[in-house]
Amino acid sequence: MRGTVQGLAFDGRPVDGGLYLRMDRWAEHLPAPLQHLVAAWSTAGLLLLAALMVLGWWRSRRADGVLMARALAVPLVVTLAFAADTLLKSVLREPRPCQVLDAGRTLETCPGAGDWSLPSNHTVIVFAGAVALWHVDRRLGALGLLLAVAMGVTRVLVGVHYPHDVLLGAAVGAAAGQVLGLLSGRAAPLVDRARAGGLRRWLTG
């Protein structure tokens, strides 16, 4: 077992360290092309989420001001969720499992000490975006949720998160997406005024 990180505030090993190790060993024996796909999903999933955001804006040009306001707010929702996640990480200060467990060869380079694990940044971002998109377009939101689940699973498989990091990340992201996604609809009057002005071409179909 690797040395414990100094200043440890929360040790995730007793929670589900055994499950993490089983998933890590399973991932280590995946065919090489599938390993590359799993490792690439961290980037690909975020890019696909960004594409869904753009598509949500595009479709909302023909919708009312409430839906357009929600569509425009999705990137802001994601940013605020990420900020909340970063603050929570600094409080919990849980070292990455690949730093404190003998996990063998992880599919992604293990971050250095001080890059905390709980919650999972990637999972927070994608769940926040997916739930916020759900309030814009149910189909886009459903697709986003599938992307989010895949993101959470792959963050464990690449070796940089415990399963509970992902679960908390999903909860934080979904809560932010739900609350902020709905509240953003209150900006509809601003969108309606913008549609009557110079931004009309960007906000109407």
Image: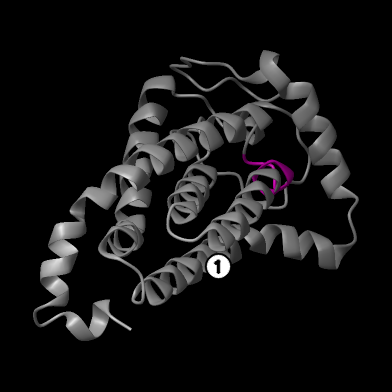
Q: Which residue is mark 1?
A: 48
For the residue pair 197 and 151, the one nearer the viewer reads as 197
Vertical side of 42 occupied by 117: above or below:
above
The quadrant in which residue 1 appears is top right
Vertical side of 133 occupied by 162: above or below:
above
Residue drawn where x is 38% and y is 50% of the image: 78
The local crowd at label 1, few if under 14, some if 14 to 19, many if 20 or more residues have their Cα within 10 Å, is: some
Quadrant occupied by the C terminus? bottom left
For the residue pair 204 and 76, the one nearer the viewer reads as 204
Vertical side of 4 occupied by 112: above or below:
below
Residue drawn where x is 44% and y is 52% of the image: 135
Specify the farthest residue to the front. 64
Residue 18 point in image, percent of width and height? 79, 23
How many numbered markers are drawn? 1
Q: Does residue 117 show up? A: no
In the rendered structure, does residue 157 fall within the stretch colored magenta?
Answer: yes
Residue drawn where x is 60% and y is 44% of the image: 110
For the residue pair 205 and 42, the one nearer the viewer reads as 205
Q: Does residue 89 show up? A: yes
Type of amino acid at the residue the image marks with label 1? Leu
For the residue pair 200 and 157, the one nearer the viewer reads as 200
In the rendered structure, does residue 159 fall within the stretch colored magenta?
Answer: yes
Q: Magenta region: which residues?
A: 154-160
Residue 79 point in image, percent of width and height? 33, 50
- Secondary structure under tag 1 reads helix
- Left or right: where 58 falls relative to 110: left
